[in-house]
Image: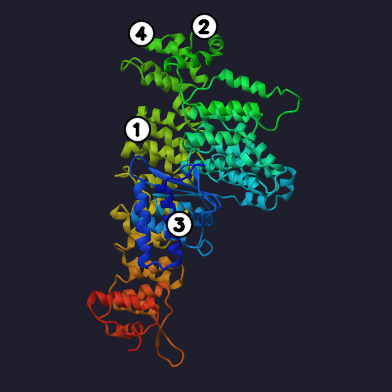
Amino acid sequence: MATLSRDLADFLVELSITLNKHAIYPSSHPLLDMAVDGVSNRLGMLFVGDRESLSIGVARRQLIIEGVATDPLNAVLKELAHRLHEHRVGAMKFVRGIGRDELGQALAALAVDPVRSAKPIGLDTDRVGDLWPHVRFFPLTYDRLQLIEDDGTERAARDQMNSGRATQLWIGLARAALVSDTSTSSITPQNDDDDTALEPATVARAIDEHQREEAYDQVIVGYLLQIGEELKTAEGAEAAGLQRRVSRLVGSLKQSTLETLLEMGGDKAQRRKFLLDASQGITVEAVIDLVKAASAAEGQTVSHSMLRMLSKLAHHPSSGSAPRGKTDPTIRDVMRRLVDDWSLDDPNPEAYRQALENISGTRGMAESAATNGIATECEPERMIQIAIEIGAIGPQIHSAMASLCMAGRAEVLLDLVEQAPKGGAATPVWDFLVEEGVFESLLKRPRIDMPLVSRFVRRLGASAAPTLLSATLAVDDAKVRAQLYELLQPFGDEVGPAIAERISDAPPAVQRELLGWLGRLNTLPPGFSAQSYLGHSEPLVRREAVRLLLREESARETAIMSALADADDRVVFAGLTAAQEKCPRAGIELIKERVNRGELDSQLRTMGIRIVAQQRTSETFEWLVGFVVTEAHWPRRPKLRPSTPEMLAALGMVVSGWRSYPAAATVLRLAERSKVAEVRAKLAHAHAATGERTLSNNE
């Protein structure tokens, strides 16, 4: 079984220990700073070289990183997996460029018990994504599958799968596959009585249709490695159920998906071990699919004739006519020897291999050409290549180009354009692609081919922006939209007018994204103003509008006042952040009113108190003292209020800004005699700055 590298193992252990320390010590404890520094240093070492990101998949009792699953019996890593799982995190991703402070904030949030937090991090990815752009969390929503697991005794018995490790592995794989951000919403079953979610075809479709994300693939690979290990030794009814399901899963997956997963499955030795383990308990058809995918992943060639022969032998057992449930030992032995001796590259020259593939893949081209009334005697791409070289484009070439487009092979035409020997030789081919609207048709497909689209965008330049932006309006998957936006990034401010033109007609989610994209431009499009979006029904749209308006000096005060009066805490936070720098007088009064009425959460009230304290007036002093001191009923004398975050913030402002006020003496005396460590810490900080002595509790 493959093991983690020392660097990755040390990083995971350090991460787990640091999270545990956050749960034990208060936020100001010096040990936490040292712990975060340790994690930050180890993470920085992992980003030395070409690695741009580090993804960690999360199972209930173990983690999956670099295609390797951690030991579920390792107490330290098991605790880390459990903590992430409790936060409903299916995977997390660290991106190059992460800073020490950003990492520390993310770890502090993960250390909070999700029961006590407002929302688990896995269910609050939009908010935390804005807070920590270099730490991405991927949700794992499996409530429905949890019901199937807990209340599925009858169904499991019907499938001869009990509640042992084989069942747990399959359910874990299904959970990981059916994460909420799959590109097809119809995958998830609509009621708890339907166990479609556990069907191999459903799981395969979810994996195939997922917009490829390394963190997602890490989870799938980890479960497949564990399942391969289980198939080698599992026996009984439960094992038979797992064997059937895995065989059907492999048979249902696209070949390209299998290749991608096997590429991520580690080095050659680990990949071969997985093939041999899995072959112990799956059907011959599934074994053949795995061998094909593994050959592509390792850049090796297996004779198609041999594979066809093995498939036919598997369907003709020497005795009996019933289909085989497991791989025949003879076939398995052939596969073992095939994989063990897999050391030579394809001896055929690359050009010869491509020629053979082209010859075998041109079936039906003659019929297609005949349908258009023009006969061709060689494959369309060859005709077009010759036409480009001699500079002659006629009706036959147009027919050949149309045939390729109808066959879904427009990328061949683009290859010919990009590889043309002379600058203008392939212009007619490019003009054909533009006139036929190939770029637009690519964006209308259910699954967008991003590499091919990006090649068109590079050639079209900024003129592709209107088409790309119009396509985002019809895309439901936020990750796909983000990939489309990234294609426009090289064009900078040139795309601003096209973005501004489409905001008003876009759905709220896209409006928020487009406003955020405008905020990343150096200059806003001429004549555009986000003021009309301050009253939008969606809070996140209002927040982006506030951020845009804060860039304009003339609209700054309007934006701050609108944000401070907003009903959503996220918008208020944006307004308070801006008000820390400069707040209008009316904004100060509005903050005081909202804090007094208790409309804001504790963090926002604390921010508001500090902003109001910027007004050094006696009226402000009296307002602050009201949060610090009250009057005892008997005997009637002043006493400190309980040490809430608001009380401590107000006390800190009084100590730092009004210590010289005669009326502040009572507050300072009560604070100095307090037995609450946090209260005395506020005073100690102020006295350290002035060199004054703090009274002991006995004075």
Disc nearer the start of the sequence (3/2): 3
Q: Residues within 10 Å of mark 4 (few under 14, many from 20)?
A: few
Q: Using the image, tell me which numbered label, if any, was put on residue 462.
A: 1
Q: Earlier in the sequence, mark 3 or mark 4?
A: 3
Mark 3 to mark 4 CA distance (whole Å): 66 Å
The relative height of residue 396 versus residue 132 in the rendered view (above or below) is above
Looking at the rendered structure, the kind of residue marked 1 is Ala
What amino acid type should be assigned to the residue bearing mark 2?
Ala
Gap between marks 1 and 2, in whole Å? 40 Å
Q: Position of residue 98 (x, y in %)?
A: 35, 50
Amino acid type of the residue that numbered disc 3 sits on in the rendered structure? Ser
Instruction: Tell me the number on the disc at residue 16.
Output: 3
Residue 655: horizontal and vertical position, in percent?
Answer: 30, 77
Q: Earlier in the sequence, mark 1 or mark 2?
A: 2
| Quarter of the figure with residue 664 | bottom left
User: Element at badge 2?
Assistant: loop
Secondary structure under the numbered disc 1 in the rendered image: helix
Asked whether the residues under the numbered discs 4 and 2 touch, taking CB atoms below 8 Å apart as contact, a structural biologist would say no
Residue closer to the observer: 13 or 389? 13
Disc 3/disc 2 C-alpha distance (Å): 68 Å
Q: Which residue is denoted by mark 2 in the rendering?
A: 375
